[in-house]
Structure formats: structure tokens, C-alpha cells
Amino acid sequence: MTVSRSRTALLALGAAALLALTGCTDPQPEPTISSAPPEAPEPAPTPTEPALVPDGDAAANQPFFDVIVGQVLAADGNAGGRAFVDALTSAGFDKAAMQVTPDATAIGLEVDSVQFSVRIGDGCIIGQRGGGATGQSVVTPVLATGSCLVGTTRAIDW
């Protein structure tokens, strides 16, 4: 039984040492409770609507051009050239720098598409309304003639 007593004594000694060490550790700090509301996270930046860039080139102004064209098409999917010219002028584009194709064929039928453009510096934003409420635009260099559209255009005299 000597082995058993030694084993029991060692176990008791180990338990006492463990208790002694536990009492020597730093107590865990009490959690602090704040009465102040938590700070709200910074709001995510909201994308801004495109705007006219007065000193910008055609490429810089194409997004705004597209917004205006989209608004015209939302109001009337078969809008004629005057609606696009008037809306772009109201938005700040230079009417004197615009061109537009006729809304009717030579025999008076409605055209399948209308093209309209704005020259900005040595670039052009050319828009097109196709059949139905679809619109597209492209930025191109000014033609050698100094204009943006090829073919017959109508006078913007209103």
C-alpha cells in the first residue's frame, strides 16, 4: 500500500499546486457596458448621375448624352429627331453643334431610325433611335467635312 499512498499523496500535491496556480492568474476584466449608441458605419458612396462636362471631350460627355436619350425614349419610344435635339439642348449641349436626320423618307413614310449628333471639339457623339424604344450611341472623330453624320441631314431651325 505504500505505492498507493505515494500515488495519492502525489495526486493531492498536484491538485493543491493547480489550485494555487489558478488563484495566481489575473482575473478576467469585467466587460464594459456603454450607454452610448454604437457608431453607425459610414454610408456607402452612392453613384452619381452623369452630368454635362462643359470642358470635356465627346467621350467624357457620352454618359450624360445617353441619360438624356434614355429619358426621351422612356417618354416616347418612337421619338423624332426634334425631341432628341430639344432634350439635349435643354440639358446643356450646344444646339449649333448638332445634326439630325429626317423623321420621314422622301415619299413621306416614317423612317426606321433617326440619327442625331453633337460635335464636341474634334469628336462626335452620335445617337440613334432604332425601331421601337431602343437607343445607342457611339463616339467618333469628326469627319473630314467637319460634320458628324454622313448623308442627308435636316436643318435645325427651330
Image (cartoon, rainbow, N blue to C red):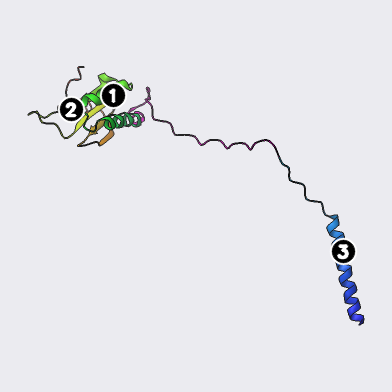
**Residue occupying the far top of the picture:** 158
Q: Amino acid at mark 3?
A: Ala
In magenta, the rendered stretch is 34-61
Q: Is residue 34 left or right of residue 83?
A: right
Question: How far across and how far down the image is residue 116, in percent?
Answer: 23, 28
Image mark for residue 17: 3
Classify 4 as above or below 151: below
- Count residues near mark 1 (Cα–Cα under 10 Å), then give few for <14, some for 14-19, many for 20+: some
Q: Quadrant of residue 109?
A: top left
Whichever of labels 1 and 2 marks the residue nearer the N terminus, that label is: 1
Question: How far across and how far down the image is residue 3, in percent?
Answer: 89, 80
Q: Secondary structure at mark 1?
A: helix
Q: Amino acid at mark 1?
A: Ala
Image mark for residue 101: 2
**Closer to us: mark 1 or mark 2?**
1
- Count residues near mark 3 (Cα–Cα under 10 Å), then give few for <14, some for 14-19, many for 20+: few
Question: How far across and how far down the image is residue 123, in percent?
Answer: 29, 28
**Closer to us: mark 3 or mark 2?**
3
Q: CA distance from mark 1 to mark 3?
A: 88 Å
Q: Secondary structure at mark 3?
A: helix
Instruction: Give the residue at mark 1.
Output: 87
